[in-house]
Amino acid sequence: MYKTVSKSLDFVTIEKQFLRFWQENNIFSQLREKNAHGEVWSFQDGPITANNPMGVHHAWGRSLKDIFQRYHAMSGRQLRYQNGFDCQGLWVEVEIEKEHAFKSKKDILAFGMDRFVRACKERVLTFAAKQTEQSIRLGYWMDWDDPGQLRRLQQALHDDLPEITYTAPSGNRFTGTPEQIIANLGSPEYGGSYFTFSNENNYTIWSFLKKCHADGHIYRGTDVMTWCPRCGTGLSQMEVAEGRKITEHTSVYVRFPILGREREAFLVWTTTPWTLTSMLMYQPSMRRNTNSVLQRQQCG
């Protein structure tokens, strides 16, 4: 006989029941033990930026990643289960600038580079803890750091404590300054998520660049690129695409008289008339169209 299925399912309650069952029965640990001698299959997680709580798009992507890993685990393969956090770049820096009401990069120098970098690391640890909790709630199986330990580390960094003892996901305990602990997050000895601001990650990047330079693959050149004057850096294609919007503007036509040619003028169309005063020259070899205007005031 089939059981009667309720017409009103409480999905949130069901989700929590599954999560509790997995935790109480150590299902994830049992799966890893079962596949400990299976074929190694390494999943490299594209790191999520630890700058804000997760959005729906993050949950969608992580659900697909989890399904992919579960398939390989069900096939008996041994997985790494290492999550990643992106810790550097404008995403974090701009938020810290907003928090301190900075108006320009000079404000960062006045604030102090060391203090600014520390504030960025604190924000990363805060939201790495938050995103870890959200990912666990999502049911995403990974070798997670303890969110409470990440928050303790963030507070120790904020308070400039001389020493802290950190219990890593590997079960090992490490004692050192907050900066020393942070520099080793995600290492084989620590386990847990990898953080792109770790020493291992940064040294690996520099080592790779050094090899590329030694092999002649790095050169100095010039290129045209989009530039953000406020951030003082180039923009990626993604940032340019996200900032592009279709808008309506009022445009104007302006006549530039030509010296020595009373009845001739350059007709300019623009949506940014405030730039006209900086127009000092033109390209004489550029192909142009010549149009006759019956009444001068039409182009004046």
Image (tube, helix red, strand yellow):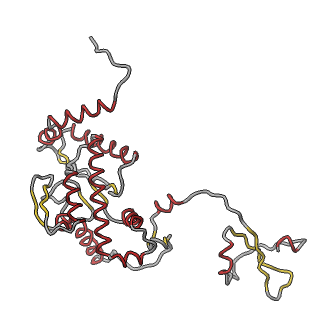
Residue 121 location, x and y as percent? Answer: 28, 64
- Quarter of the image where one finds residue 137: top left
Depth check: give the residue in front, 224 or 27: 27
Judge from the rendering whether residue 219 lies leftward or rightward of residue 197; answer left or right: right
Asked if residue 74 is positioned above or below residue 8 in the image, the reply reads below
Of all residues shown, which one is farthest toward the top?
1
Asked if residue 10 is positioned above or below residue 220 in the image, the reply reads above
Asked if residue 29 is positioned above or below residue 273 in the image, the reply reads above
Of all residues shown, which one is farthest toward the right?
294
Depth check: give the residue in front, 77 or 48: 48
| Residue at image coords 16%, 55% | 191
Residue 135 location, x and y as percent? Answer: 29, 45
- Quarter of the image where one finds residue 262: bottom right
Of all residues shown, which one is farthest toward the front?
159
| Residue at image coords 43%, 79% | 221
Q: Quadrant for the N terminus, please.
A: top left
Q: Quadrant for the C terminus, please.
A: bottom right
* Numbered marks: total: 0
Judge from the rendering whether residue 75 lies leftward or rightward of residue 263; answer left or right: left
Residue 73 location, x and y as percent? Answer: 21, 40
- Quarter of the image where one finds residue 19: top left
Residue 124 location, x and y as percent? Answer: 30, 60
